[in-house]
Amino acid sequence: MFSTKESKPHAARKRLLSNVYSKSFIQSSKEVQEVTRAILHKRLLPSLDSYAVKASPLEVHEFNYAITMDFVSSYLFGLSNDSNFIQDVEMRKRFLSWYFKRSEHFFWNQEIPRLTQLLQNISIRLVPEWVDAANEEIQAWVLRLCRVAEQSLNAASEYTEKAHGTRPIVYGQLSDSLNKSSSKPETQNDGQEAISNELPVASELLDHLAAGMDTSGITFTYLFWEMSRNPALQSSLRQELLTLSPTLTLDSNNDHNKNSEIPPARSIDALPLLHAVIMETLRRHCPIPGSQPRQTPSTPTSLAGSPPLPGGIRVSAQAYSLHRNEKVFPDPETWNPQRWLDANQHESKKDEMMRWFWAFGSGGRMCVGSNFAMQELKYVTAAIYTNFTTRIVDDTGIQQADAYTAGPRGNQLTLKFTRAEVS
């Protein structure tokens, strides 16, 4: 879906998944609630508490990728089939090594794939061989996840009865939709059986994993950094979070195996300060500030007052520029959640801010996982700042890189977590 240029095929693929990524589905899904409860209470909070008890610093940038990968892989493939990178540190480091080896070499295959392949055929490599090896490792890993998810679907009664299991929601939806499509007579050749959809499904879901891990991971890094610079805001947010019922507090007896409940998604979504903190982080530190390419339609089209542009012209917009419109976001370089709270009192102002807010894009190409991402960001932030205070130990290189996907230049942020006084 992400690399589909033509509008109609892109829209058709997106429709296959739009239901399971809709806000209403995600907020009401028992699977999403169970994924959230299990990751927060059985993995995230116990892990952070161990650092707080030992008063040990934690490098959170890598850890944030573990959080986000666990969330998205659980939703795609089922909780019992997910990455579990929060706890499986060795596999986390191995995967991230593969993943980031590739990142410096996306340009060639993305922008000039034919030339890249032509040169490779005559032994001139623009992309090193070890990038191919890393890609193969990642592809094999995703194929394994798809296969265990398929096994779960084929043994539904077995895994649904497990306390720690959930259905592979996205995998099941996509696989079922593609299998139905390929079994139609018009999609088959001369009476042959429908072709396997294993690779198309795995390819699609690899994109979902990468997008879900990378962007939300970067957002958490900058959210924690900004919050750690604002102790008073941490306190204000904690007071708001303690109005939830039930609260997201750690078990007082340190029983991390207890089946602690979580507040309903709609109550989390309704907290104004929590929402403002996340929106302002996405605005000021948008994880994808780079240009989003689009292609003009065949009919000559005028954009932003330009002369009519012929079809097939590449154009783009970027969140970095849109989010720094001083008329809409005064003092745009300042991280200021209060601007979103103030906008709640003025509907026209709020509408204008949302019109220029482009962290997830807009229109038919808008991020399909935006609702899932927002709910994940809210639950994780709420769980952490209900139970802990954070302060910066080392933020060397925290400035965002000048890149399409922009994490910190130093690829690190080290914080100290301390148990908060929760009354």
Image (tube, rainbow, N blue to C red):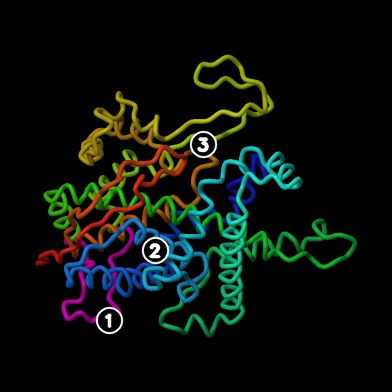
Tell me whether circle 3 and circle 1 mark residues in contact (CB < 8 Å).
no
Vertical arrangement, residue 271 with respect to residue 351, above or below: below
| Magenta-colored stretch includes residue 295 | no
Residue that label 3 marks: 292
Residue that label 1 marks: 258
| Magenta-colored stretch includes residue 247 | yes
Tell me whether circle 3 and circle 2 mark residues in contact (CB < 8 Å).
no
As drawn, the residue found furthest toward the top would be 307
In the figure, is residue 392 to the left or right of 71? left
Quarter of the figure with residue 406? top left
For label 3, the crowd category at 10 Å Cα-Cα, with few meaning under 14, some 14 to 19 and many 20 or more, is some
Helix or strand or loop: what does disc 2 sit on? Answer: helix
Q: Percent from the top left, x then y, of residue 229?
A: 18, 47
Which residue appears at 64% of the width and 40% of the height?
5
Residue that label 2 marks: 66
Q: Nearer the viewer, mark 3 or mark 2?
A: 2
Helix or strand or loop: what does disc 1 sit on? Answer: loop
Of the two numbered discs 3 and 1 on the same chain, state the one appearing first in sequence. 1
- Quadrant location of the C terminus? bottom left
Q: Amino acid at mark 3?
A: Gln
Q: Which mark is residue 347?
A: none
Q: Percent from the top left, x then y, of residue 245?
A: 22, 66
Q: Which residues fall within the magenta stretch?
A: 242-266
Q: Provide the major secondary structure of the magenta segment.
A: loop
Vertical arrangement, residue 283 with respect to residue 302, above or below: below
Which residue appears at 51% of the width and 60% of the height?
98
Of the two numbered discs 3 and 2 on the same chain, state the one appearing first in sequence. 2
